[in-house]
Image: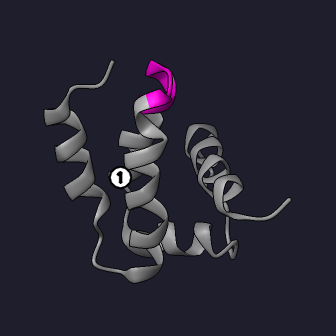
């Protein structure tokens, strides 16, 4: 279970000031993060430590993270918004 303090903190950390990232990360943290297992929650927190420009490239699919945990989280977020 995720407490409201953690969710609020993550919500504000997910707001990056870059629209392309905000529209992916903010809904993800609100709608999906509370249902993730502990490992995926840790992966999301790890993703938030990355530079905005790196994340922008990953989410625009111009590059992929070298780290397997980050790659998993980026894919999870993209799969949520991309039509199959």
Point 44% across, 20% down: residue = 38
Q: Position of residue 30 (x, y in %)?
A: 37, 48
Point 44% across, 76% down: residue = 53
Point 60% across, 67% down: residue = 58
Question: Farthest residue toward the left?
Answer: 5
**Quadrant in which the N terminus appears:** top left
Judging depth in this view, the residue of 17 and 51 nearest the camera is 17
Indicate left or right for 18 with 53 as reference.
left
The residue at which mark 1 appears reads as: 48
Q: Is residue 36 magenta?
A: yes
In the image, which residues are magenta? 35-41
Above or below — where is 31 with respect to 3?
below
Above or below — where is 5 with respect to 73?
above
Q: Position of residue 68 (x, y in %)?
A: 64, 39
Neighbor class of circle 1 (other Cα within 10 Å; few <14, some 14-19, many 20+) is: some
Question: Farthest residue toward the front?
Answer: 31
Q: Position of residue 70 (x, y in %)?
A: 55, 45
Can you tell which quarter of the image residue 72 is in? top right
């Amino acid at each position: 279970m995720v407490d409201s303090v953690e969710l609020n903190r993550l919500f504000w950390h997910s707001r990056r000031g870059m629209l392309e990232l905000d529209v992916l990360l903010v809904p993800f943290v609100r709608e999906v993060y509370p249902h993730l297992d502990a490992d995926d929650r840790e992966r999301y927190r790890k993703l938030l430590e990355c530079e905005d420009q790196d994340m922008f490239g990953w989410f625009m699919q111009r590059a992929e993270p070298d780290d397997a945990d980050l790659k998993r989280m980026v894919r999870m977020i993209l799969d949520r918004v991309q039509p199959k």
